[in-house]
């Protein structure tokens, strides 16, 4: 199934009923053709709603919006005179977290009166819930901060490392926090002792990362193939080398997507192609083999049986695996 959108796609996701695309014209397009006008301006970030029904998006209009098939868009929160830069949602706790400027905010879609706002010294670039949805990591210049989602007055745990951190993720076991950095590397911390993990050697900026194989592997973009870091045991990747699959010296992996409990990895390339593979095997399955504009949105479905992609020209597709 292919689409040709008249705006660039910010995100491709799967809710409980199928693929969903969030666009730079402020609209949310569903796989069945349904369109919801969510924002007066561009969608900047998106995540699946905690219920799995539709998606929550942040826009340059300063609004966090819930879009579902057959329903009007619902504004969940606003940030006055700020863009919504990043967003995450937790199915485990039902909460949504988003950043606007230097503020990390937490809301509960089931409780309109609940909101927490946590301030940082520098702009918050990324937010991520831990596996239980109780803590949130916020990436910023100089490292990351860890907050408890529901506690109003608190001091964060600060994870320090010099440089600009652009996105953040928890490992599926909650033992590690990993950030992407502006200077073409990853950084991580083991939470029990704040030990630093340096993961470098990338030829370009790392735009995305994804855990797979029950959290035993971390896949990233940023190289000529998909880079795989081992996360087995209490030491994670410490003292271990990364491997690479799908190496092609004529292009770069721009995005990766995976599901923690599955062993399949999807990769979107700067030359417009998309492949899926099991890291243990050597073959690549090109679900989009023709070259074209760079892949800018990519998502593997929860059951790892579909992949959704979009390129920077507005072309998009959903492939059954």
Image (tube, rainbow, N blue to C red):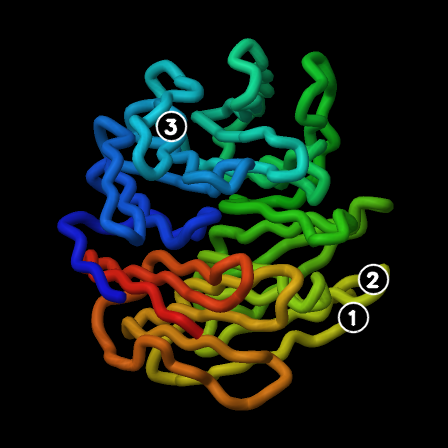
x and y, in percent, of residue 59 in the image = 33, 31
x and y, in percent, of residue 69 in the image = 33, 39
Q: Quadrant of residue 91?
A: top right
Q: Which mark is residue 152?
A: none
x and y, in percent, of residue 177 in the image = 69, 48
Mark 2 or mark 3: which comes first in sequence? 3
Sort mark 2 into few (<14), some (14-19) or many (20+) by Cα contacts within 10 Å.
some
Q: Which residue is mark 2?
A: 235
**Callout 1: SS:** loop
**Callout 2: SS:** loop
The residue lying at 54 percent from left, 37 percent from top is 51
Seen in the picture, residue 165 relative to 232 is either above or below; the reply is above
**Callout 3: SS:** strand
In space, the residues marked 2 and 3 are separated at their CA atoms by: 39 Å
Q: Is residue 114 left or right of residue 77?
A: right
Q: Which mark is residue 65?
A: 3
Of residue 47 and residue 181, the one placed in the foreground of this image is: 47
The residue lying at 52 percent from left, 28 percent from top is 122
Q: Is residue 164 left or right of residue 70?
A: right
């Amino acid at each position: 199934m292919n689409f040709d959108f008249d705006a660039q796609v910010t995100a491709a996701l799967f809710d409980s009923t199928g693929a969903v695309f969030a666009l730079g014209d402020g609209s949310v397009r569903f796989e069945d053709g349904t369109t919801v006008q969510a924002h007066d301006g561009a969608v900047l970030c998106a995540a699946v709603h905690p219920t799995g029904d539709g998606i929550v998006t942040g826009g340059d209009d300063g609004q966090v919006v819930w879009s579902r098939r057959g329903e009007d868009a619902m504004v969940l929160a606003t940030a006055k005179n700020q863009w919504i830069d990043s967003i995450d949602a937790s199915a485990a706790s039902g909460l949504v977290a988003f950043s606007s400027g230097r503020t990390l905010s937490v809301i509960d879609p089931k409780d309109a009166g609940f909101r927490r706002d946590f301030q940082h010294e520098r702009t918050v670039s990324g937010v991520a819930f831990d596996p239980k949805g109780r803590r949130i990591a916020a990436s910023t210049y100089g490292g990351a901060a860890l907050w408890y989602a529901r506690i109003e007055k608190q001091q964060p745990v600060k994870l320090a490392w010099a440089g600009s951190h652009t996105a953040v993720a928890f490992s599926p076991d909650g033992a590690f926090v990993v950030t992407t950095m502006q200077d073409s590397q990853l950084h991580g911390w083991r939470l029990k002792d704040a030990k630093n993990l340096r993961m470098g050697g990338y030829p370009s900026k790392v735009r995305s990362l994804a855990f797979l194989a029950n959290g035993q592997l971390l896949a990233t973009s940023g190289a000529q193939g998909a880079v795989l870091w081992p996360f087995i045991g209490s030491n994670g990747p410490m003292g271990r080398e990364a491997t690479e699959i799908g190496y092609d010296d004529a292009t770069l992996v721009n995005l990766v997507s995976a599901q923690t409990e599955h062993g399949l990895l999807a990769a979107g390339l700067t030359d417009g192609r998309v492949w899926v593979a099991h890291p243990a095997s050597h073959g690549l399955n090109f679900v989009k083999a023709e070259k074209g504009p760079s892949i800018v949105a990519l998502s593997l479905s929860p059951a790892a049986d579909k992949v959704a992609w979009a390129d920077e020209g507005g072309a998009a597709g959903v492939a059954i695996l």
